[in-house]
Amino acid sequence: MDERLQALRKYNLWDSAPFDFGYERNGYTDKIASYTGNRLVKVLVGQRRAGKSYLLRQVARRLVTDGVKAENTLIINRELADFDFLATHKDLDELLRLYKSELKPKGKVYLFIDEVQMIEGWEKTVNSCSQDYAEEYEVFVSGSNSRLLSGELATLLSGRYVCFEILPFSFSEYAGISGREADKACYTEYMNGGGLPELYALSNPELKRNYISAVKDTVLLRDIIQRHSIRDPKLLEDIFVFLVNNASNLVSVSGIVNYFKSQGRKTSYDAVSNYIGYVEDTFLVHRCDRYDIRGKDTIAGNAKYYLNDLAYRNYLYPGYGYGFGYLLENLVYLELRRAGYDVYTGVTKGKEVDFVARKADRAVYLQCAYLLADEATVEREYSALETIADNFEKVVVSLDDLTLPLREGIRHVQAWKLAELL
């Protein structure tokens, strides 16, 4: 048998052998399923090891469960060594011909390609399949670079796509896979751990630390250093460490340059700016721009950066000063992104508002506090929201055991219940 066909059989649903689908992430699979039945290319993006491969398999299984014949699904994971022969789109075209000649699927073929950016010219095959009116395909691809979210993807696929950002496990998913009640104790444990799915198969902190370190090294090496021919890999990693240890703080490129210069490191504004952009592209961190609430416009200069997963801080750099309030703020940011909001850090009348979250016609202003322990803390968190003149929702999020009553239209929400509000 052709070795390529053997690789396909090993990783597809055609046979009755057991198959690892991972933890069922219904929030994502339901959303993706609602977009099926058309020629739009479904694009899953997110950092390496966030669970995109499992989600593609779960979507394929759902199609089969709903009546699609298993041989009409084709799953290709380019990240696996078995598929190293897939170097270019021509190799992919040949593999598709081999699959069709051997399996002889009748009707629409559902094509899943994981880590598609590793195939040179992949968009030529994907475009051809999505536009082929002689042989019907529905295509799902995944990638680990945010350029697939921006103009690059629009150019490659001519606008015929829909994008889904895949993040590590949410708190509700963490509680589900842990078999725990979604309460404060569980949330605190989640906040001090991480959400990358494979962490839950590891039994002790040392293994988890080694795993997170390996993920970080792989992303920096394969997705940044090799792709962009980085001249100073040590500076790249040091910038990542700086962003981890300053997550939830306002920082600027100039400030980072000055920090390294104070450490005796020679660097430039352009180098730091480019390296930060590369780290953002891999989804390790997210930039959160400042937003003038009264002027309704973004503000150039300082921005906040949030980690895609707190595991980088918790397992790799736990010794740095980093309060629970900052950890909570990071988790709230990620929860807002999961819910589909565009997220900014707000400024109004000289006061900072942690988040301005917008989605369609809805806007929510949020303040985060570890605990509303005294009147001074309550006043500080609520007063910034009270200065906002419009009637959009205003929320204070904390880890308090009790919920405070409504104050001037401002709701208090316990962090582990935030997803219910969004």
Image (spheres, helix red, strand yellow):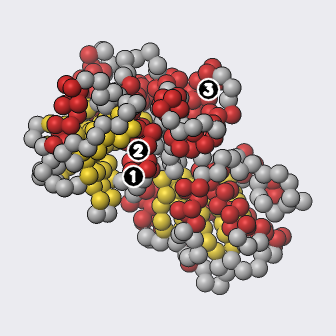
- What is the residue that sits farthest to the bottom in this orientation? 134
List x then y, in percent, for residue 41: 54, 68
What is the number of callouts on the image?
Answer: 3
Residue under the point 46% across and 56% down: 148
Q: CA distance from mark 2 to mark 3?
A: 27 Å
Q: In this rendering, would 236 be left or right of 176?
A: left
Instruction: Look at the numbered disc 2 and give the secondary structure of its residue.
Output: helix
Q: CA distance from mark 1 to mark 2?
A: 7 Å
Label 3: few (<14), some or many (≥20) within 10 Å? many
For the residues bearing labels 1 and 2, Cβ distance under 8 angstroms: yes
Residue 100: image x %, image y %? Answer: 77, 72
Earlier sequence position, callout 2 versus callout 3? 3
Q: Nearer the viewer, residue 140 or 233?
A: 140
The crowding category of the residue bearing disc 1, from other C-alpha atoms within 10 Å (few below 14, some 14 to 19, many at least 20), is few
Tell me the quarter of the picture where residue 38 sits. Answer: bottom right
Q: Which of 126/167 is in front?
A: 167
The residue lying at 53 percent from left, 62 percent from top is 31
Checking the image for residue 208, the label placed there is 3
Q: Amino acid at mark 1?
A: Leu
Residue count near mark 2 (Cα–Cα under 10 Å), binned few <14, some 14–19, many ≥20: some
Q: What residue did someone put label 2 on?
A: 418
